[in-house]
Image: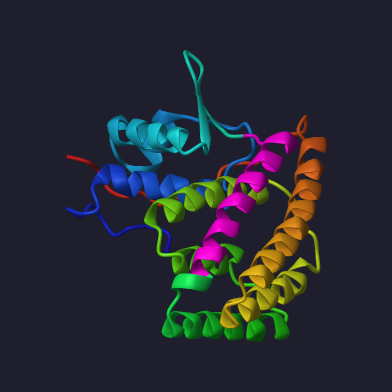
């Protein structure tokens, strides 16, 4: 279910609002450049404006929304140059993570990665598409055993996910991604650092090409009407 059942002591109301609005953004519930009204969000979530304002400020710090003084808060619109910069940063972070993973990952952790890839194999084979691409990459980064690196990568993933959610997806990419992930996993299982770096580089080059193509399509429609917001059930009234 989308809604959270009432107000709970933890997470706090602000945290619940943050998570709800963040999910809506990453799922494409708002169009690029669409204004996010504090009043409207507060009314729809049945909370006061305070938690909404704090949540939007946090999302702005994460690069998912833009706050314009005296004008309001808007969904971040990503230019191709910005996506390219994010992909360059992602390449640096994931290459470092994969290199560390070959040294630090335990056998049990690698077996869990194998199980994750096998589950993806079933989904792709059944025509259900690919499970969230982020899951595989987060798992690889986690194997590095570096919390700071993992947090940095998470912020990059969210921004790229937002850019991707606002654009069309190229058909057939799921199976290509599965094959590329399989190559990364084989190299990790072999603990072959050079092969891991090469597999990560090849995968991210293909991913960058795909996302830049889709962002280009979105930019072409930028003068068109904005999409409507996704219905959202209230969190509950703050006290």
Q: Is residue 133 in sight in this rendering?
A: yes
Q: Residue at x 52, y 68 (%)?
A: 140
- As drawn, the residue found furthest toward the top would be 70
Which of the two residues, 1 or 99, is positioned nearer the viewer here? 99
Q: Looking at the picture, how far across and down is residue 75, in whole percent? A: 56, 35
Classify residue 76 by image quadrant: top right
Q: Quadrant of the N terminus?
A: bottom left
Position of 3 with respect to 28 (left or right) is left
Q: Looking at the picture, how far across and down is residue 21, in whole percent? A: 44, 45
Position of 174 with respect to 155 (left or right) is right
- Tally of numbered tags: 0
* Looking at the image, residue 62 lies above or below residue 182: above
Report the magenta residues as a range: 77-101
Q: Is residue 78 magenta?
A: yes
Q: Residue at x 46, y 29 (%)?
A: 37
Q: Looking at the picture, how far across and down is residue 42, in whole percent? A: 36, 36
Q: Residue at x 46, y 47 (%)?
A: 22
Principal secondary structure, stretch drawn in magenta: helix
Position of 166 with respect to 96 (left or right) is right
Q: Is residue 231 in sight in this rendering?
A: no
């Amino acid at each position: 279910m989308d809604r959270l059942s009432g107000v709970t002591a933890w997470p706090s109301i602000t945290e619940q609002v943050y998570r709800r609005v963040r999910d809506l953004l990453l799922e494409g519930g708002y169009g690029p450049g669409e204004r996010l009204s504090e009043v409207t969000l507060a009314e729809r979530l049945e909370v006061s404006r305070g938690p909404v304002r704090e949540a939007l400020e946090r999302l702005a710090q994460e690069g998912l929304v833009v706050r314009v003084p005296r004008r309001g808060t808007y969904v971040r619109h990503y230019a191709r140059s910005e996506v390219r910069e994010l992909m360059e940063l992602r390449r640096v972070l994931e290459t470092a993570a994969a290199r560390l993973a070959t040294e630090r990952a335990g056998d049990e952790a690698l077996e869990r990665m194998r199980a994750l890839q096998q589950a993806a194999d079933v989904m792709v084979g059944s025509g259900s598409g690919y499970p969230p691409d982020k899951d595989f990459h987060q798992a690889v980064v986690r194997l590095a055993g570096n919390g700071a690196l993992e947090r940095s990568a998470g912020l990059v993933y969210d921004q790229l996910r937002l850019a991707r959610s606002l654009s069309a997806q190229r058909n057939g990419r799921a199976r290509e991604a599965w094959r590329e992930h399989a190559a990364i996993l084989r190299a990790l299982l072999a603990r072959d650092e050079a092969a891991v770096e090469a597999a990560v580089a090849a995968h991210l080059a293909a991913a960058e090409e795909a996302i830049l193509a889709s962002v280009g399509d979105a930019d072409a429609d930028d003068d068109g009407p904005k999409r409507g917001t996704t219905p959202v059930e209230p969190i509950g009234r703050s006290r």
